[in-house]
Amino acid sequence: MNNPDQSFLNDIKQEQLHLLYKALPMSQTVAMVNAAVLVFFSWGLLPFSVITTWLSIWLLVTLIRLLDYKSYTRTSDNREVNWEKRFIWGAGGSGVVWGAAAWVLFPEESAAHQMLVIFVLAGITAGGLTTLSSNKKAYITFLCLALLPLSVRLFLSDSTAGLMMGALVLLYIGALISAGKLLHNNIKQNILLRLQAEVREKKLAENEVMLIAANEAAEAANEAKGAFLANMSHELRTPMNGIIGMTHLVMQSDLSSEQKNMVGKAHTSAKSLLAILNDILDFSKVEADKLELESVPFNLRAVLNQVIQYTKPAAEEKNISLRVKVKLVHKENFIGDPVRLGQVLTNLVGNAIKFSSTGSHVTIRIVENDATKTDRHASVTFLVEDEGIGISENQLDMLFQPFTQADVSTTRKYGGTGLGLTITQNLVSLMGGRLSVESQPDVGSSFAFTLDFLIAREHGQEELTDKKSEADSLYQALHGKKVLLVEDNEINQQVAEGILKQQKIDVVIANHGQEAIEFLSTGHFDAVLMDCQMPVLDGYEATKIIRSKESDDRIPIIAMTAHAMKGDKEKALGAGMDDYITKPIDPSQIWECLSKYFT
């Protein structure tokens, strides 16, 4: 970020300070719920004196912070006291108390309770990302004091699972620090842009020329936002690739059932964090009108089965019955975007489960409209119905607004970013439909949309049932192949190498583009997996040099990068690469991609 004018520095600091104190009551309320959960489940497992001592200290620190909040709100001139230092000390005190929980509320004999402590600490620090990031010192102080004791405790354990979890906690700390820095810079940039905009608005009334300057500033803000999202995507996907990849490799090793359970939960949590990142990126693409839909043959029943498979665990946890009612005139094969259709249905079904009470029903209805049927086109209506809390009429207008819930209390009880329905509405609109809702409080809600599809050629049953064996046959073509992996990140090297060796691929690692060129000049390789952003020589320039030196034999070069924004794929292909894979790496995706060039 460019250095702001000196006149804005104090105003920016005051705005950041105001954001910190404004979020304090809500963050302490959430922390109180988590503390109550820890104390409740610790009762009987730990000595009474230990539990009450920890809780008393936590309540004392919380009371001090709330009194500090009261003093801040009652002070007319907040520039008279060093409130920033007081807040950082308060955040540090909270971090120390939560960090102590990893020692005093961490019984050796209960693995389940240990996992509860780990997930509570992970949730508290992840929640602090949004409430504390306006001040880097406050957030990093809280994060390190809350999680480093947990990592040390896990490393001091005698089990392999403890060492692995300790390493994952360190990776998690690094990912949150990286995300916190990016979010801090974005907050600071947004405050600066707003303050500058206010100055410009005053000048516009005096001088018509300032209108041109305001338009230029708006364009610069959009470009800065796009650059920030692209950078955030890359910086977060890189550590996420390490976490998801490492846990995937660990799960393939010889573990006890308890170890597999713990690593599996860490793997699932990492994928959930990736889903949140993808939601944010999807929203930004929709906002910028840069989200593109596919038009490919797909089986509607297969999409529905994936939705059920993804949402079924949450339904079973609440003893909610998922009912599926499908009535199609034609067969189940259409042409459209199965990934986005599945995303829409998953969001709607997930919301229905989330806001339904235990023991109720969620119904998915898919009906082909007879009145519009032809030999080539079909109109299909999708409905998701629940028996949940419902929505009042005066709240329906807010339902599809980004970053909002119909009721603030809903966020407190059920959580969520407030992006799901906004993305869903936009995706349905892009596919040519309109998302509608009918709801009554305490009765339930019904979300519906209708889409028109071209009818695809029906796949033969043999083709569908033999899909797995066909994939296995394709993967056999990978055995014994020699692949040059060009990657500068040591963790990503280990992840990719482990995935490739599962298919008996011989892997040679180059740390940057210049090394890759040297390896290719002295040895034979069947393919190259090329990271794009590297020191010395990046993947784009390295690919151009490799292509310029080739004669008749063209070696497949596949981009394997954390860059996942619109235009990144085109840039890779334009540099001479043959294909494109995004991180975090999906093992089947990388195997399928390589198989195309070896069959």
Image (cartoon, rainbow, N blue to C red):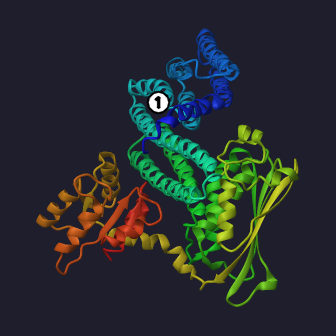
Residue 306 position by quadrant: bottom right
Determine whether 244 is above or below 346 in the image.
above
Residue 431 position by quadrant: bottom right
Of 362 and 577, the residue lying toward us: 577
Name the element at disc 1.
helix
Amino acid type assigned to the residue bearing label 1 in the image = Ile
For image coordinates 23% across by 57% down, the residue present is: 537
The residue furthest left is: 522
Of 399 and 378, the residue lying toward us: 399
Q: Position of residue 544 (x, y in %)?
A: 24, 69
For image coordinates 36% across by 74% down, the residue present is: 596
Q: Tell me the quarter of the image containing the N terminus.
A: top left
The residue furthest top is: 49
Q: Is residue 375 visible?
A: yes
The residue at which mark 1 appears reads as 140
Q: Is residue 392 visible?
A: no
The residue furthest front is: 206
- Within-10-Å neighbours for mark 1: few <14, some 14–19, many 20+: many
Of 228 and 40, the residue lying toward us: 228
Q: Position of residue 443 (x, y in %)?
A: 88, 51
